[in-house]
Amino acid sequence: MVRKRLLLLLKPFDLCLSHELAALPSSNRRKALQVLRFLYDRMLVHKNSINFCRDILRKKAIKSKVVFRSDLSQPIRDVDLVITIGGDGTLLQASHFLDNSIPVLGVEEFSEVFDATRSTGYLCAATVNNFEQMLEGILENRFEPSELARMAVSLNSKLISTSALNDVLLAHPCPSVVSRFSFRITQNGEPLSNLLHSRSSGLRVSTAAGSTAAMLSAGGSAMPILSKELQYMVREPILPDPNSHLMHGFVKSDETMDITWFCREGLLYIDGSHVVHSVQHGDTIELSSKAPTLKVYLPPHCYPTMYDTEV
């Protein structure tokens, strides 16, 4: 078995302070205790998953460096494999610090209690149940990572360092305010579509990996996971509009979506709420799938033929 340099990336533990509970009025204390018990149980699931994975690594004499995702501030380098424990959110955050040379394996935690705050683990190939088998297959080169397309984002012709693995949302900071913008599809600087003007709740653009999340919930299409295209959807466009049929579509791998913002203020979200950039009237945004890909070990439901070899 080949020894590799591993980075174990963890979701931070939830912290519950007893003195804050004691300061609550007695009428609210019972409900607060229920919340604290739920948070404590969730923390135990996370902690047990971490301990299980680390025990497997120790048993195999594999050294690893442990980092909490909240402590990431520089690109991840000098490792051969990144293992994330905590779900899709932890894997997404890791992707913002990875180039296309280091693969990542996501480990999803299982809990018998429904938790609406947790991700579905769609991109996580491992759980505590199959982590050892997945790790052996990777270290013995029996599994190969897939290369997922990421979205390059430029603001006023300046490339933003964070590439989107899931999606980008452009909208007014206030959800009740109309977002005004125009967009068109171009190729090598030449327009491929008419300039479309939109008054709506904003614009969402997703990669193939992100097409099964908010895009699908909004009525979009689930794309093949290895597709290099982008999918866009204008959110709640104000109708009637003769171009309403063009408010949802796709951007091919050699094309770019050019957007101009016409509100006084706006926000550009990359992969959720953690990476946000402000936009102003007249700002331009360019979106394409020309960012470096991300190497990810995917679960069978994403790409069933990947695991034909038995572990």
Image (spheres, helix red, strand yellow):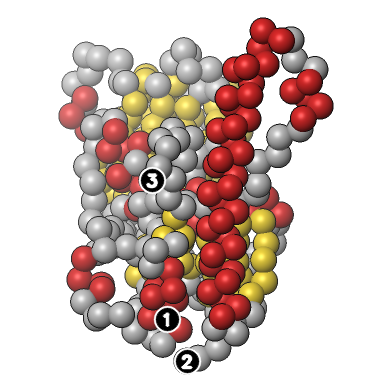
Indicate which disc residue 105 carries.
none
Secondary structure under tag 2 reads loop
How many numbered marks does the figure carry? 3
Q: Would residue 75 be seen by someone viewing this image from the given angle?
A: yes
Secondary structure under tag 1 reads helix
Task: Tell me the kind of residue under disc 3.
Answer: Thr
Relative placement, left or right, of 117 versus 219 is right
Task: Tell me the kind of residue under disc 1.
Answer: Glu
Q: Residue at position x 25%, y 72% from top?
A: 306
Q: Residue at position x 63%, y 30% from top?
A: 36
* Label 2, label 3: how far apart the Cα atoms are: 32 Å
Query: In this orientation, which residue lies closer to the viewer: 61 or 182?
Result: 61
Q: Quadrant of residue 134?
A: bottom left
Q: Residue at position x 54%, y 65% from top?
A: 52
Q: Would residue 191 be seen by someone viewing this image from the given angle?
A: no
- Rendered location of residue 237, percent (x, y): 31, 20
- Would you name the residue on which mark 2 appears? 1
- Rendered location of residue 105, percent (x, y): 46, 66
* Label 2, label 1: how far apart the Cα atoms are: 8 Å
Query: In this orientation, which residue lies closer to the viewer: 25 or 302?
Result: 25
- Would you name the residue on which mark 3 appears? 120
How many residues crowd around disc 1 within 10 Å: few (fewer than 14), some, or many (20 or more)? some
Query: In this orientation, which residue lies closer to the viewer: 44 or 89?
Result: 44
How many residues crowd around disc 3 within 10 Å: few (fewer than 14), some, or many (20 or more)? some
Task: Tell me the kind of residue under disc 2.
Answer: Met
Question: Closer to the camera: disc 1 or disc 3?
Answer: 1
Indicate which disc residue 136 carries.
1
Relative placement, left or right, of 158 versus 20 is left
In contact (CB < 8 Å): disc 2 and disc 1? yes
Image height of 44 relative to 128, above or below: above
